[in-house]
């Protein structure tokens, strides 16, 4: 896989993305993991899109949760290019968790686990509540609801990075009261372009 976040040449990261693509394509024939089934489109719409978060936040050696991980986006692509991350993939659908566990093994990813459960329940458990440096989420739900899922996972000063569509102003307005209740505030909105599509990455800090 070629991306501005990756070094030129045939790297170990490229090989891991190839394995990930192969496994995702094979499993997608049996289970509906993603509606995108063209390999070239998977690279752009899933892999490169996931890595676009690095244009908004520098991830290095943090404890990261991916809420609503699905087939592993954005968590696994981020882990491939930032192997020092400790990653928890949270997903409510069992078959997707089975796939995530398979991929973790196939890619030999260290410090990476997939957890089967609902975020609104896990974020109250002592093991996960206020434990993470960074929480990421992509295409899960509207921002007011998503903040309620994700912000409780953050330690004080932690960052929630929500990957949203380009027009995010209405969602931000609706989330204003929720953010106050959760002691959080919008830190930055970064516009990124992947495959000709513009999206907003909203960075929210736990105060």
Image (cartoon, helix red, strand yellow):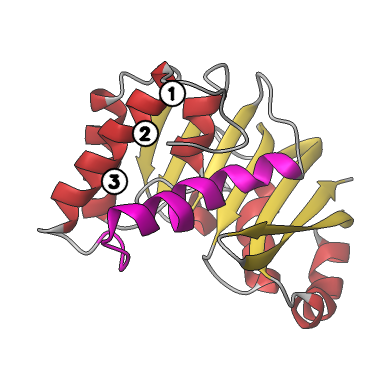
Q: Is 43 part of what is drawn in magenta?
A: yes
* Residue 166, quarter of picture: bottom right
Q: Residue at x 16, y 50 (%)?
A: 27
Query: Which residues are drawn in magenta?
Result: 33-55
Q: Residue 181: x percent and y percent?
A: 83, 64
Looking at the image, residue 157 lies above or below residue 68: above
Q: Quadrant of the C terminus?
A: top right
Kind of element beneath mark 1 = helix
- Of 112 and 195, nearer the camera is 195
* Residue on which disc 3 sits: 97
**Is residue 125 in sight in this rendering?**
no
* Residue 104 placement, left or right of 73: left
* Residue on which disc 2 sits: 17
Q: CA distance from mark 2 to mark 3?
A: 19 Å
Dominant secondary structure of the magenta stretch? helix
Q: CA distance from mark 3 to mark 1?
A: 23 Å
The numbered mark at residue 13 is 1
Q: Residue at x 57, y 48 (%)?
A: 123
Q: Residue at x 25, y 24 (%)?
A: 105
- Of 31 and 93, nearer the camera is 31
């Amino acid at each position: 896989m070629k991306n501005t976040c990756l070094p030129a040449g045939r790297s170990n990261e490229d090989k891991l993305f190839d394995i990930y693509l192969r496994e995702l394509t094979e499993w997608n024939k049996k289970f509906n993991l993603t509606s995108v089934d063209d390999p070239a489109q998977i690279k752009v719409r899933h892999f490169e899109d996931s890595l676009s978060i690095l244009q908004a936040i520098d991830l290095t050696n943090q404890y990261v949760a991916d809420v609503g991980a699905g087939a592993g986006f954005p968590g696994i692509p981020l882990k491939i290019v930032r192997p020092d991350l400790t990653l928890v993939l949270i997903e409510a659908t069992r078959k997707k968790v089975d796939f995530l566990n398979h991929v973790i093994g196939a890619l030999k990813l260290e410090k990476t686990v997939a957890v089967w459960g609902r975020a609104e329940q896990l974020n109250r458990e002592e093991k996960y509540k206020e434990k993470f440096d960074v929480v990421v989420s992509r295409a899960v739900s509207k921002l007011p609801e998503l903040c309620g899922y994700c912000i409780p996972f953050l330690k004080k000063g932690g960052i929630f990075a929500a990957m949203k569509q380009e027009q995010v102003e209405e969602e931000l307005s609706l989330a204003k009261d929720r953010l106050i209740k959760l002691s959080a505030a919008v830190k930055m909105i970064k516009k990124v372009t992947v495959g000709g599509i513009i999206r907003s990455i909203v960075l929210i800090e736990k105060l």
